[in-house]
Amino acid sequence: MGRQRVDGQTCFVLHHHPYSETSLIIDVFSRDHGRLPLLARGARRPRSAMRGMLMAFQPLELGWFGGGEVRTLAKAEWLGGMPLLSGRCLMLGYYLNELLVKLLPREDAHAALFDTYFAALSALAQGGADAPELRRFEISLLRELGYGLTLDVDADSGEPVQTSADYAFVLERGPVQKVGAGDTALEQGLRGKTLIDMAADDYSDPRTRLESKILMRRLLAHHLGGQPLQARRVFMELQEL
């Protein structure tokens, strides 16, 4: 890959770790270039202009250059306009970031997913801990990765899902109106109404919010291949305290 210079990219920092005594490697999610690692030289120095700027959950305008696996951060500007996350919403923000880091391939642009992530963070910044934006983000993530979700059609019969019927969700296939669908089924029962609501992006029903949360948690666990989510573990420990 040849050397390139990119300027004016709206990005979010997903994760960072120290590199040498004075620098950082930051994992960023950009709208036009997807997820990629950047070397922030000198960002750990006390007087670095970037030291307090490279924060998660804040929109930044970044520029970088280079042709290797890790590009070099050239500039960073604070775009502002996003309140800081706190409490439960902060933990949910870390949950979104961890999903992106573990599931999204590097340098694979997903503009629609970026916009959905931005909307989810905006909702969390306004205190929407149970916001429908979380489910929208999870569904968008799986669809962008090629795991399209069929929600409103019975995978066995091909008929539309019925509001009053009960369904199991079979991995890699979709909802089926039957009991004991086998080891590949998500055993948690689902109302047909929940599936129809999800397909219509309608989370006004409390039971739909609950059942959709359970369904998405199990689907994501399947695609994570057993990788634990640290954000979820920390959140559960905090709840116990």
Image (cartoon, helix red, strand yellow):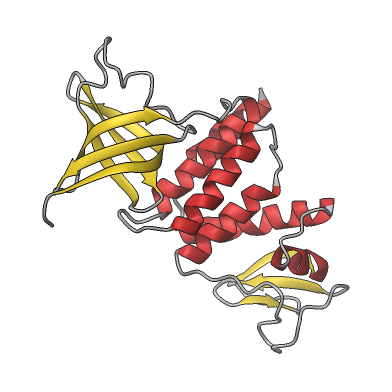
Judge whether 145 appears above or below 68 on screen. below
In front of the other: 201 or 159? 201
Residue placed furthest toward the front? 8
Judge whether 28 appears above or below 51 on screen. below
Residue drawn at 52 percent across, 44 percent down: 96
From the viewer's perspective, is 48 left or right of 227? left
Judge whether 151 appears above or below 28 on screen. below
Count of marks overlaid on the render: 0
Residue placed furthest toward the top? 46
Residue drawn at 63 percent across, 36 percent down: 124
Quadrant of the rendering where the N terminus is positioned: bottom left
Residue 64 location (% of width, % of height):
23, 40
Residue 48 location (% of width, % of height):
26, 16
From the viewer's perspective, is 51 left or right of 234? left
Residue drawn at 23 percent across, 34 percent down: 73
Residue placed furthest toward the right? 164
Residue 19 location (% of width, % of height):
21, 28
Residue placed furthest toward the left? 2
Q: Is residue 23 visible?
A: yes
Residue drawn at 51 percent across, 36 percent down: 94
Q: Quadrant of residue 123?
A: top right
